[in-house]
Image (cartoon, rainbow, N blue to C red):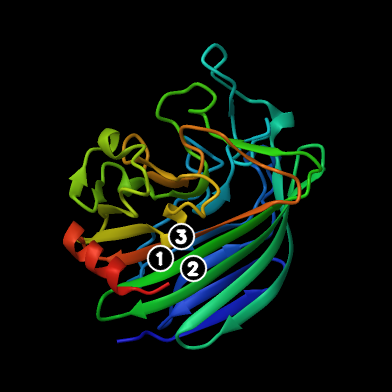
């Protein structure tokens, strides 16, 4: 049973999407005030159809974690993730303010909505700390498949990024800089505190964090995260899904899963976990992702069935 969608746009601030009267997505494009946290748009709060909050914002352990956001932790020695920068095994993490980049909102060329689907296309400029334009991004968010009977809805998040710097851009992660199994970068989700210790699912079933960490997307196109919630006798499930082309030779670089349930709940679609990749001036790359937000505890079989039945 489809749940009708509606949209409210607070100009200069955010776009909110509601389903059946429940606000399920707030996409904030007004820059946050703290430069060290890498100013950029993000989605928060995000909720299930039942109203359960599924994103965290500025947690005390990582103030730069903000809901669901596009990041690049290591980009030609700039940090578009926010916070401390990993400088190698000898120096570890350091607060290097002149490494912090930002993403500037340029406009919404597309904002289309009906009762079943909302599409938001946004143009952004990736700026180095010195204010140089390094990349142009076309970002597309699509809210769809809000189904009250299933208790779920889906958000598709696409990125098309073009290098405008005038020289190659190098994409990496803390792992490519020397920290083992810390390959976070790309689209990142931070969960609320009560997702800590949740269950991580891959197509074969639940796995401990350390075994799921670094799994190639070519072997597991989706990853699930299920948690029992505080305050209510309820569970919530999130599915993170790669579009089919992300796992083929057409992708600019192979993707891997970054996931932790302890000590913090977080997932990233890492596009440069173990190895750097380079994007030449004038060249572009694209990725498409889907995040499904569901009330209840889904097992691997139900998750697989959902992924297989949903078209791109």
At horizontal 42% and vertical 24% (from top left) the residue drawn is 180
Q: Quadrant of residue 302?
A: bottom left
Relative placement, left or right, of 42 versus 202 is: right
Q: Residues within 10 Å of mark 3 (few under 14, many from 20)?
A: few
Q: Is residue 294 left or right of residue 271?
A: left
Given contact means CB atoms under 8 Å apart, are the residues at marks 2 and 1 in contact?
yes
Of the two numbered discs 3 and 1 on the same chain, state the one appearing first in sequence.
Answer: 1
Quickly name the residue at label 3.
245
- Asked which secondary structure carries label 1, the reply is loop
Identify the residue position indicated by label 2 in the image. Answer: 25
Q: Find residue 212 and report its horizontal and vertical position in percent.
A: 29, 40
Up-down relation of residue 185 to residue 110 (above or below): above
Q: How far, Cα to Cα, is label 2 from label 3? A: 26 Å
Mark linked to residue 47: 1
Q: Residues within 10 Å of mark 1 (few under 14, many from 20)?
A: many
Q: Nearer the viewer, residue 11 or 289?
A: 289
**Left/right of residue 212 with respect to residue 135 in the rendered view:** left
Are the residues tagged 3 and 1 within 8 Å (C-beta)? no
Against 26, residue 5 (above or below) is: below
x 32%, y 80%: residue:
147
> For the residue carrying disc 2, how many other residues have a C-alpha within 10 Å: few (<14), some (14-19), or many (20+)?
many
Could you give the CA–CA distance between mark 3 and mark 1, rounded to whole angstroms? 28 Å
SS for dot 3: helix
Q: Earlier in the sequence, mark 2 or mark 3?
A: 2
């Amino acid at each position: 049973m489809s749940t009708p969608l509606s949209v409210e746009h607070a100009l200069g601030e955010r776009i909110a999407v509601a389903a059946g009267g429940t606000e399920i997505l707030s996409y904030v494009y007004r820059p946050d005030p703290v430069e060290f946290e890498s100013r950029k748009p993000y989605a928060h709060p995000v909720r299930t159809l039942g109203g359960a909050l599924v994103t965290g914002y500025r947690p005390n352990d990582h103030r730069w974690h903000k809901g669901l956001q596009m990041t690049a932790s290591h980009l030609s020695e700039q940090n578009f993730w926010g916070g401390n920068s990993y400088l190698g095994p000898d120096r570890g993490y350091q607060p290097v303010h002149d490494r912090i980049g930002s993403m500037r909102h340029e406009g919404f060329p597309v904002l289309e909505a009906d009762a079943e689907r909302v599409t938001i296309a946004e143009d952004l400029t990736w700026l180095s700390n010195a204010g140089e334009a390094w990349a142009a991004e076309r970002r597309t968010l699509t809210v769809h498949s809000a189904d009250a009977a299933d208790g779920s809805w889906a958000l598709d998040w696409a990125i098309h990024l073009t290098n405008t710097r005038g020289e190659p851009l190098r994409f990496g992660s803390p792992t490519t800089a020397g920290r083992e199994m810390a390959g976070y970068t790309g689209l990142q989700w931070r969960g609320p505190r009560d997702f800590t210790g949740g269950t991580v699912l891959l197509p074969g079933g639940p796995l401990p964090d350390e075994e799921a960490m670094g799994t190639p997307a070519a072997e597991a196109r989706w990853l699930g995260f299920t948690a029992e919630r505080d305050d209510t006798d309820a569970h919530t499930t999130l599915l993170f899904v790669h579009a089919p082309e992300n796992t083929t030779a057409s992708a600019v670089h192979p993707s891997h899963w970054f996931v932790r349930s302890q000590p913090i709940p977080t997932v990233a679609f890492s596009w440069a976990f173990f190895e750097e990749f380079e994007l030449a001036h004038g060249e572009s790359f694209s990725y498409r992702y889907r995040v499904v937000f569901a009330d209840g505890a889904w097992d691997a079989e139900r998750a697989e069935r959902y992924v297989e039945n949903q078209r791109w």
